[in-house]
Image: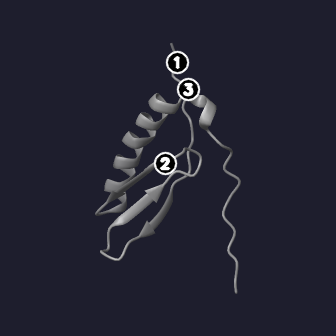
Amino acid sequence: MEVTKREFYVIIERDEDGSYVGEVPQLKACYSQGETIDELLANIKEVIELCLEEEGDQNISEFVGIQKVVI
């Protein structure tokens, strides 16, 4: 049986302590952090799997994109 791969976007920010914080906007309450981007990505993959187990496919929203706004 072939496993279908899914693609998720991760918004990455650096917090005031210098750690990286990631959010998956397609999934409700799907956040993680890490000291490096590699650590963050490893952690967020685990959180994505947990979110999918918990919520299933019905709560995956469509990610449209990010737009910069200058004020």
**Element under label 3?**
loop
Mark pair 1, 2: CA separation: 28 Å
On the image, the x and y values in percent for residue 15 come to: 38, 72
Q: Nearer the viewer, residue 51 or 18?
A: 51
* Residue that mark 2 sits on: 29
Of the numbered discs 1 and 2, the one sitting upstream in the chain is 1
**Element under label 1?**
loop
Mark pair 2, 3: CA separation: 23 Å
Q: Nearer the viewer, mark 2 or mark 3?
A: 2
Q: Nearer the viewer, residue 37 or 51?
A: 51
Query: Which residue occupies the extreme top position in the image?
Result: 1
Q: How is the image coloured?
A: one colour
Q: Nearer the viewer, mark 1 or mark 2?
A: 2
The amino acid on which the numbered mark 2 sits, given as a three-letter code, is Ala
User: Residue at 52% of width from left, 18% of height from top?
Assistant: 2
Q: Quadrant of residue 16?
A: bottom left
On the image, the x and y values in percent for residue 22 come to: 44, 58
Mark pair 1, 3: CA separation: 6 Å
The amino acid on which the numbered mark 3 sits, given as a three-letter code, is Thr
Position of the C terminus by quadrant: bottom right
Q: Are marks 1 and 2 in contact (CB under 8 Å)?
A: no
Q: Are marks 1 and 3 in contact (CB under 8 Å)?
A: yes
Q: Residues within 10 Å of mark 2 (few under 14, many from 20)?
A: few
* Residue that mark 1 sits on: 2
User: Residue at 54% of width from left, 32% of height from top?
Assistant: 5
The amino acid on which the numbered mark 1 sits, given as a three-letter code, is Glu
On the image, the x and y values in percent for residue 1 come to: 50, 12
**Element under label 2?**
loop
On the image, the x and y values in percent for residue 25 come to: 57, 52
User: Residue at 35% of width from left, 58% of height from top?
Assistant: 33
* Residue that mark 3 sits on: 4
